[in-house]
Amino acid sequence: MKLYLDRATLAGRALGLGPVEVLEVESRKPGKAAEAEVLRAHLADCHLIACDEHGTARPSRAFAAEIGRLRDDGVRRLVFMIGGADGLDPSILAEVRGKLAFGPQTWPHALARVMLAEQVYRAVTILAGGPYHRD
């Protein structure tokens, strides 16, 4: 995952994107509401997109275009949030501006983080005009 994050940060600088960071938080109390309380402390002044099974799967080019549009619209802090094993609390989901799905399968959180990091890196390279093997 670190490789994708580093590459996305490096390539994104010239595009006004980045740095790309991962922040992992852990609640001391069990449950989605307690997790939401901890997460909310990190959501000031951001455009929040939840990774959620009820979200929309996007092709890589559409994902890149969305990131580029948000940047062009002046979004300075874009946050993708992956919740705990039980998903995100409804109070957090009520605050999101979009939902992203990785398809209908269930993915372990560690793998979902890597998949998201790779897609952010891929989006940055698409926005930079790099070759994309699906063209």
Image (cartoon, rainbow, N blue to C red):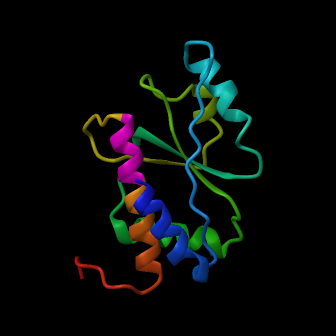
Vertical arrangement, residue 66 with respect to residue 100, above or below: below
Q: How many marks?
A: 0
Q: What stretch is highlighted in magenta?
A: 109-116
Looking at the image, residue 132 sits to the left or right of residue 120; the answer is left
Please tell me which residue is depicted at 65% across the width and 39% down the height of the picture: 95
Residue 23 is at least partly visible in this image: yes
Vertical arrangement, residue 75 with respect to residue 32, above or below: below
Residue 62: image location, x then y, percent: 40, 68
Q: In which quarter of the image is residue 53?
A: top left
Q: Which of 62 and 1 is in front in this view?
A: 1
Please tell me which residue is depicted at 53% across the width and 74% down the height of the picture: 10
Residue 58: image location, x then y, percent: 36, 59
Residue 118 is covered by the magenta coloring: no
Is the magenta region chiefly helix, strand or loop?
helix
Residue 115 is covered by the magenta coloring: yes
Vertical arrangement, residue 23 with respect to residue 16, above or below: above
Residue 63: image location, x then y, percent: 43, 65
Q: Nearer the viewer, residue 24 or 41?
A: 24
Please tell me which residue is depicted at 46% across the width and 69% down the height of the picture: 7
Looking at the image, residue 114 sits to the left or right of residue 48; the answer is left
